[in-house]
Image (spheres, helix red, strand yellow):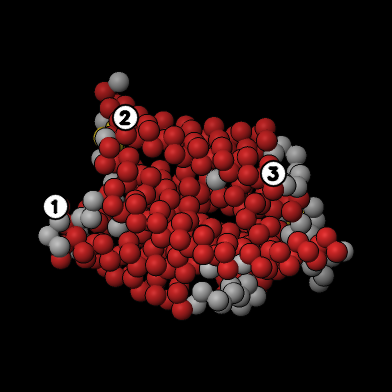
Amino acid sequence: MDLLATAWLGTPLWLWLSFFGIVVALLALDLGVLHREDHEIGVKESLWLSAFYISLGLGFAGFVWWQLGQQAAIEYVTGFVVEKSLAMDNVFVIAMIFTYFAIPRLYQHRVLFWGILGVILLRGIMIGFGAAIVTQYAWVLYLFAAFLIVTGIQMWRNADKEYDVAGSPVLKWVRGHMRVTDGLHGNQFFVKQPDAATGRLVTWATPLFLALVMVEFVDLVFAIDSIPAIFAITTDPFIVYTSNIFAILGLRALYFALAAMVHRFHYLKYALAVLLVFIGSKIFLGDLLGLAGGKVPPSISLGVTFAILAAGVGFSLWKTKDAETTVSGGSAGG
């Protein structure tokens, strides 16, 4: 019992083990029960799964409040909402990747599931590294804040630009260093096929594997934005990691609902840009205004975050309502 009570990264070990136990159980449920066989995930199933993951993520906030207090719970919810919101932008890029490689909906969940395993490991490493730096050098938070402000401004300027999958240096490198089949081979990432020169059976990667590589790479790029954003909210590694992972776990389910209506959220990226600038700015505002602890109160941060995102979603839905009517009318006429 003493071992379980031992602090690891500032939080009792048993809390970490409880969290990882929940994650493993969710992954086992997803792969072993809900999606044992490949099948197309419809919008209705996606919405139900999204509601389940969001409820679970927010329910964990109650557990955090019970064990670590009100402020930790508010910081967790703020981090969860920020990460979930930024992940929506990630969804739109993933949709472009699947379109580029012509990945059928039947196999998209397989790519997203194995992608999440890489995300859990990668973000753990990045957050652990970030926490160690912030603990040793508190001034790094100001670098994170400045980075978020610059990133938000760049996101605003590039909001209308689409992600260039074909021009990705990672994709070019993989194509140049691996044998890649011309088409898909079911749900396989690798297949055995004869080598054109020797005729011997060798391992070839499939476009499904390329899609997985690109999804992982895109998440790495997005993590560079989202992780500093959460560190600007709290430096507690447990809150940073758990809010991050709970938000990401529901990304796969959310994807199948949002991918069908990407055009309705065209203006959301502007709200995300404003959100990044706000999160970065509040680090400096806390000091300039002489606030307690040099921080904007967590409740205010959470309220402003909700307000920015609600405005972005509402404006986007309002601006694209005519496009939705046109699409519906065209479908009905066909």
User: What is the spatial separation of the Cα atoms under label 3 and label 2, in whole angstroms?
Assistant: 33 Å
User: What is the spatial separation of the Cα atoms under label 2 and label 1, in whole angstroms?
Assistant: 24 Å
For the residues bearing labels 3 and 2, Cβ distance under 8 angstroms: no
Q: Check disc 2 and give the amino acid type.
A: Trp
Within 10 angstroms of label 1, few (less than 14), some, or many (20 or more) residues? few
Q: Position of residue 138 (x, y in %)?
A: 19, 59
Residue at disc 2, secondary structure = helix
- Establish if 41 lies above or below 149: above
Q: Residue furthest top?
A: 1
Q: Check disc 1 and give the amino acid type.
A: Ala
Q: Position of residue 316 (x, y in %)?
A: 55, 65
The residue indicated by pointer 1 is: 292
Q: Quadrant of the N terminus?
A: top left
Q: Quadrant of the C terminus?
A: bottom right
Which residue is at a point 44% across and 39% down the rendered structure image? 58
Left or right placement of residue 289 versus residue 28 in this view? left
Q: Earlier in the sequence, mark 3 or mark 1?
A: 3
Tell me the number on the disc at residue 66: 2
- Establish if 97 lies above or below 73: below
Q: Position of residue 109 (x, y in %)?
A: 67, 49
The residue indicated by pointer 3 is: 44
Left or right placement of residue 3 versus residue 162 in this view? left
Within 10 angstroms of label 2, few (less than 14), some, or many (20 or more) residues? few
Q: Check disc 3 and give the amino acid type.
A: Lys
